[in-house]
Image (tube, helix red, strand yellow):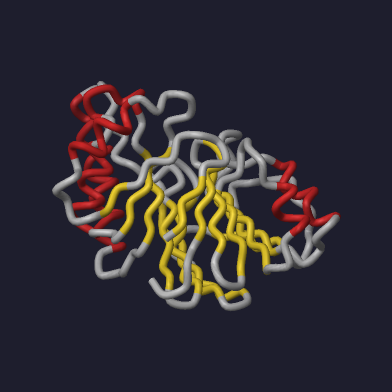
Amino acid sequence: MGEAITIKYLYHSGFLVETDKNLLIFDYYQGTAESLVTKSSKNIFIFSSHNHPDHFNPVNLEWQNNRPDIQYILSNDILDLPKNRNINLVAPYEKLEIGNLKIETYNSTDIGVSFLVQDEGIRIFHAGDLNWWHWRDTPEEMMKAEKNFKNEVEKIKGKIIDIAFFPVDPRLEDNYSTGAEYFIQELTPKVFIPMHFADSPGILKKFECKMKEGPSKIYTLIQKGQELIL
């Protein structure tokens, strides 16, 4: 992947990715990020996949008071935003270029979008709430959830993914990793980092062991502020 990349786990689905020139923050909810933003001399990009409070915290809009050059890439279901030129609202299946980033959006199987971001030679996928939400539901709802997820994965096929952030959610019980396994099988990201487990990271070791022979390298970040250098 060329230059070293630092990934910091913020909390839940929130990550900070530091590349050679940029800081990319995805789905900030809780954790230490503001001090990193205000002290950094790098370009800063804030991504929020949808308006659920565990994926979008409006406090991140205040960071531009100290860094007015921040660029925001936000799902268009996030409402009541100031009409600033640095706030870019996106829907599924859009492409845009900001600075040296190339950004593509895909759909979610809940609300909002998922992001595929190319920073120079690094391609980062953040799923937001895209997942095979395999709840114990009616057979019709379960079939619909499977179809919607597999159809979206099909749209992403053919894209190279170096780093993927994707839900592994213990609330789904035995199906906690059904979506993750299918995503890895079909899209083979080089690095796969589980997210969306909130305060229940216990399932991740089981997932890591389960997928150790798979095509993707699994890294589990569970402590707020924990870093990974690739």
Q: Could you say which is closer to the camera, residue 184 or residue 52? A: 184
Regarding residue 141, the answer to whether it shows in the image is no
**Quarter holding the N terminus?**
bottom left
Measured as percent of width and height from the top left, residue 70 is found at 73, 63
Q: Is residue 104 left or right of residue 88?
A: left
Q: In which quadrant of the rendered view does residue 66 lie?
A: bottom right
Q: Could you say which is closer to the camera, residue 98 or residue 215? A: 215
- At horizontal 46% and vertical 46% (from top left) the residue drawn is 128
Regarding residue 191, the answer to whether it shows in the image is yes
- At horizontal 56% and vertical 34% (from top left) the residue drawn is 54
- At horizontal 42% and vertical 40% (from top left) the residue drawn is 195
Indicate whether 204 appears above or below 77: above
- At horizontal 27% and vertical 38% (from top left) the residue drawn is 145
Q: In which quadrant of the rendered view does residue 51 lie?
A: top right
Residue at the limit of the structure toward the right, as seen here: 65
Measured as percent of width and height from the top left, residue 92 is found at 46, 58
Measured as percent of width and height from the top left, residue 203 is found at 31, 27
Measured as percent of width and height from the top left, residue 162 is found at 35, 64
**Quarter holding the C terminus?**
bottom left
